[in-house]
Amino acid sequence: MGRLTISGLGKSFGGMEVLRDIALDVRDGEFVVLVGPSGCGKSTLLRLIAGLEEATEGEIRIGERVVNDVPPKDRDIAMVFQNYALYPHMSVRRNIAFALRAKGRPKEEIEAKVAEAARVLELDALLDRRPGELSGGQRQRVAIGRAMVRDPSIFLFDEPLSNLDAKLRHQMRAELKKLHRTLGTTIVYVTHDQLEAMTLADRIAVMRGGRIEQFGSPLELYSRPANLFVAGFIGSPAMNFLKAEVEASGTVARLADGAALPLPVTAPSGRRITIGIRPDDLSLVGPGAETGAARLSGRLAMVEPLGSESLLTVVCAGQEIVCKVPGIPALADDAPLSLGLAPQALHVFDSESTLRLS
């Protein structure tokens, strides 16, 4: 079974606590991504799962077995590293077969498993080459193949695509999704790239400061972020934030420039809140246009043409916000703009606790 259950997990190095109270339940066959900024503890958590670090407290369970004191080689996991860790003097064939040869597996079994991995990863024509003769994407596939032949219950990936250029990263993301569908093996994957997390994961654990801020599906994290950190981290371009105060009715917020916005939730009068708006949920509207919703007024600061769409940076209520619009609008610098939005598209957070109001 490839189920992974973590409870109350903590890790300290000397007097420095880098992970605390980590709880995670990864279902058998699930693709889970650990994502967060540098230094949040995601790679340390992966190393604890692999057995490369010893937990200070808590429990790690693979299937029905507690593995805290089980050495890495006996945990039935395979790990793929950021730097590939291939043997440069060995052929692709021998690199893939290395773990099986080290275990003394029969020659026929080794040849069959290497051939199957090469077929799945499209490495058949490269088996007699050495790593120095391969591209970055090909070397990464060899590293994955070496992990595949071990037939583990869990694959662990530690930022495997970060050394590749943008085009190769996109290609390898598609190959990893295809591989997961083919093998059906549990995967725990570490990255700092939220786009990578959103495109690959069944569920995502967003980490900050050694804690898991939210664990859920990509859609859940995008549409109902639990707090300001998750809201700002998930989504590209990032969510816009506007400071506001709740009026007496409890259903209207007043911005710094006096503009009023209807709220999708009821909040106590006078409460200081932060309103989140996705750039995709803003639209450029002309004078007198029927928006059927609220409006924000501002002045254009910058246009970023992206081809089929553009990002407009607008100064609104003393803050810069980004709006995504189709095409490349012909707008003058500092032009007055009106942005339409639907109240149900607003995300409302308590400014003090940073938690979502629901």
Image (cartoon, rainbow, N blue to C red):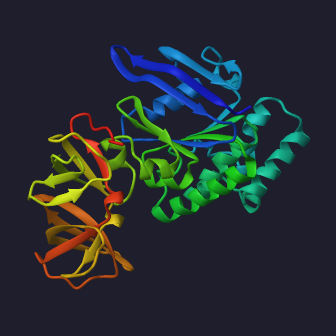
Q: Nearer the viewer, residue 311 or 345?
A: 345
Q: Nearer the viewer, residue 342 or 105?
A: 342
Q: Does the image show residue 128?
A: no
Residue 39, x across and y down, in percent? 36, 34
Question: Which residue is located at x 63 percent, y 30 percent?
Answer: 4
Q: Nearer the viewer, residue 169 or 208?
A: 208
Question: Which residue is located at x 14 percent, y 41 percent?
Answer: 270
Task: Give the answer, above or below, for where 15 lies relative to 163.
Answer: above
Place residue 31 in its image quadrant: top right
Residue 66, x across and y down, in percent? 65, 17
Q: How many marks?
A: 0
Question: Which residue is located at x 10 percent, y 54 percent?
Answer: 256
Task: Give the answer, above or below, for where 263 lies relative to 191.
Answer: below
Task: Identify the image quadrant of the C terminus.
Answer: top left
Residue 181, x across and y down, in percent? 70, 53
Residue 330, x across and y down, in percent? 22, 85
In screen coordinates, is 162 left or right of 140? left
Question: Which residue is located at x 67 percent, y 31 percent?
Answer: 3
In screen coordinates, is 137 left or right of 213? right
In screen coordinates, is 164 left or right of 315? right
